[in-house]
Image (spheres, rainbow, N blue to C red):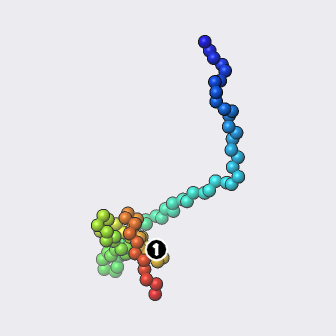
Amino acid sequence: HLVLRLRGGGKKRKKKTYTKPKKAKHVHKHTKLAILKFYQVDGNGKITRSRKDCPHETCGAGVRMAVHKNRFHCGKCSLTYLQEEE
């Protein structure tokens, strides 16, 4: 037999009306050839690293530390060195 009446259950919920607009998410800024910031080439063709390597044992020599206004920060192990203000 086909039963058409509903057994139990409540009414359909009213759709929510939102008061504030959705928050705009942060968009990652892409910089072209960003690897060029990690190295400096002098007049003789000698290449020097301009960013500090992370000294932590999990990171090693290949992981560079980010340069902020007042600190160096490793993105892999979250090690931070604060710079002294002169």
Residue visible at 68% across and 54% down in the picture? 20
Number of numbered discs present? Answer: 1
Please say whether residue 37 is visible from this viewpoint.
no
Check the picture and name the quadrant holding the N terminus.
Answer: top right
In terms of image quadrants, where is residue 26?
bottom right
Task: Specify few, some or many for label 1: CA neighbours under 10 Å numbering under 14, 14-19, or 20 or more.
Answer: few
x and y percentages locating residue 48 in the rendered image: 33, 76
In depth, the one of 36 and 55 nearer the eye is 55
Q: Amino acid at mark 1?
A: His
> Measured along the vertical axis of the image, is residue 60 above or below residue 40?
above
Q: Where is mark 1, residue-wise?
A: 68
x and y percentages locating residue 36 in the rendered image: 40, 69
Does dot 1 land on a helix, a strand or a loop?
Answer: loop
In depth, the one of 42 and 8 nearer the eye is 8
In depth, the one of 3 and 63 nearer the eye is 3
Q: Is residue 19 left or right of residue 64?
A: right
> Measured along the vertical axis of the image, is residue 2 above or below residue 49?
above
Residue visible at 62% across and 56% down in the picture? 23
